[in-house]
Every structure is written in structure tokens, then in C-alpha cells.
Amino acid sequence: NWTTGDILEEQVERIRAQVGDARVICGLSGGVDSAVAAALVQRAVGDQLTCVFVDHGLLREGEAEQVERDFVAATGVKLYVANEQERFLKALEGVSDPETKRKIIGREFIRAFEEAERAIIAEAEAHGEKIRFLVQGTLYPDVVESGGGEGAANIKSHHNVGGLPEDLQFELVEPLRTLFKDEVRAVGAQLGLPAEIVGRQPFPGPGLGIRIVGEVTHERLELLRKADAIARAELTAAGLDNEVWQMPVVLLADVRSVGVQGDGRTYGHPIVLRPVSSEDAMTADWSRLPYDLLARISNRITNEVEGVNRVVLDVTSKPPGTIEWE
Ligand code: XMP
């Protein structure tokens, strides 16, 4: 009977055998897979690992800090941060079409990551060292699924850190290749990673960029971040994190409706709550959240987030609706 400790030890041994004394690079997305993969490699080979975090400015409240501060504190990894918020905003200027947004974010992400890579390679070479390996957080279900077939990936152009183009200059280290998601979370907890990272619900690579229906701007991101933080905090406070697979919070930036707040008429934007239950994200049902919780979220968002005067609930299953709005 395998324990989490056994899995951890076995992976650490394998990584050591594969990597030897070479140097390794690993991209962090803020998600659980890349975090656990990186923490395993760090446990195995320590400072031979350099992690890269491309901050595209499309993460939720607190998530960049979770990587830059909490993950580093928990693991001691060497972290290279690329602050690319401006770059992504600029590239997304004037763009509303969902697929175009996805392609732009994916393209800029790869470019930014490669620039960071080059900087780290140069630094290593200055010390007479070479980077030989790239860590990827590929899970067992990804291994089974690749080879094609039906999938969300065919409907929308998905992007995540595991989706970087095959970088032929590196050999891959894939310490999660035999693991399922729950095992990855257990290993992460055993490695002492912060609960917010280990328990994080799925979050798309293009981030909040595809949760703003309309053009992505700095102000809209700020607004959505506040609304999302309120919704998440209330869901957690209600003890329902485990009932819900994921709860996208979406800003309908292209829609306005009339409201009344204080002593005046408002003409603001709606926020959509999209809580779903699912097994694998291929199909999903909308979560029957308690009305009291929905009321609290709605009251708080309309009171605390300027520019929002309406909160609506998405009651569509998947299919026909996808989980994300874009
Ligand atoms: P949809 O919207 O297709 O989403 O029903 C299914 C699941 O995939 C997530 N998702 C993504 N994950 N990169 C990712 O890593 C992406 O580009 C992406 N798009 C959607 C979505 O959040 C849901 O869990």
C-alpha cells in the first residue's frame, strides 16, 4: 500500500537519477501542478533548480503573492519573476474576440517565458554551467489524453504552462507523470506547500483575460479581482469549497444595465457567478448554492465594487454552456 511519503521519496530519487548535477528550469503558473512539480525537483536537487514566474497581470487577488512570497518561503526555490503586466495589457488593447484574446495571451506568454529562459541561461553560462532540463507538471490523465481525441482543447485553444512548445534544447523532467490530481495535492501538502496553492481550484492559463467579456483593461481587471475575491471568500466562509468544482466570476464589460443605488440612478456592469460541479470539466452542472450565500455575495459585490450594480447566476449545464464564458 503506497503512502504519500513513498510516492514523494520515489519521485525524489528518480529526479536525482535523471538530473545528476545539471541545472534545471521550471515555470510556475500559480497552479497546483507546476507548484508541486517544482517543489519535488527542489527537494531532489536544491539550488540546481531555477523557477520562472511570468506575472501576466491576469491572476486573481493574492495569487502572485502566493507564488512570489508564500511558495518561495515554503520551498526555498530560486525564483525569477518576469513582471509583464504592461506587456499583456498592451497586446490585448482593443481586442474583444475570445479566441483572439486566447491566442495573444498564449503567444505573449511563450515569448515572455523564452526571454526569461534566455536570461537564466546567460546567468548560468557566466558561471560555466548549462541548463539541461525543463520541468513540466504533466499529470497521468494528461499523458492518457494526449494523442488527441475529443476534448475541451479542441473547442477552445487552451493554454497553460504545460502547454509550452516543445523546447528541443531541453530534456523534460515530469515528476507527476504517474500521478492523479488528488495524489498531486497530497504530495504538495506533504511537501509543506501553502493550502491556498495545494487546494486551488482549476484556473485557466489565460486567467481573468477570458473572464472579462469585452476588452481587457487595467480598471476592469481591478474591478473583477475585487468581485472575484468577495465571491471566493464567501464560498470559503460557507464551507462549500469542496462542493464546488470551480466558480468563475465573470465581468460583462460590454453590457450595462440601469440600477438605483444611494440616491441616484446607476448604469453599471453585471457580474456573473458561474459555480459548477464536475468530475473532469468535460461535463458540468451548475451548483445549487444556498440562496443565503448567493444573497451575501450579491449584496457585498454591489456594495463594495464600484461600477457593478447587478449580480446574476449562470444556471446552464455543460453542455451546452462551457464552464468559462470565453
Ligand atoms: P471550458 O470553458 O472549456 O473549460 O468548459 C473546461 C476547464 O478548462 C479550464 N480552462 C483552461 N485551462 N488553459 C487552462 O489551463 C486554458 O486556456 C483554459 N480554458 C479553460 C476551465 O477553467 C475549466 O476548468
Image (cartoon, rainbow, N blue to C red):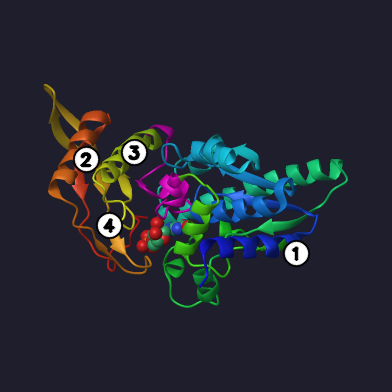
Residue 68 among magenta residues: no
**Residue type highlighted by circle 2:** Ile
Report the residue marked by disc 4. 243
| CA gap, disc 4 and disc 1 | 40 Å
**Residue type highlighted by circle 3:** Ala
Report the residue marked by disc 3. 229
Q: Secondary structure at mark 1?
A: helix
The x and y percentages for residue 2 are 52, 70
Q: Name the residue: 42% across, 52% down.
A: 203
* Residue count near mark 1 (Cα–Cα under 10 Å), binned few <14, some 14–19, many ≥20: few
Q: Secondary structure at mark 4?
A: loop
* Residue count near mark 2 (Cα–Cα under 10 Å), binned few <14, some 14–19, many ≥20: many
Q: Is residue 276 above or below residue 312?
A: below
Looking at marks 3 and 2 on the same chain, the residue that comes earlier in the sequence is marked by 3
Looking at marks 3 and 4 on the same chain, the residue that comes earlier in the sequence is marked by 3
Q: Which residues are magenta?
A: 195-219
Judged by depth in the image, the label closer to the viewer, 4 or 1, is: 1
Report the residue marked by disc 1. 17
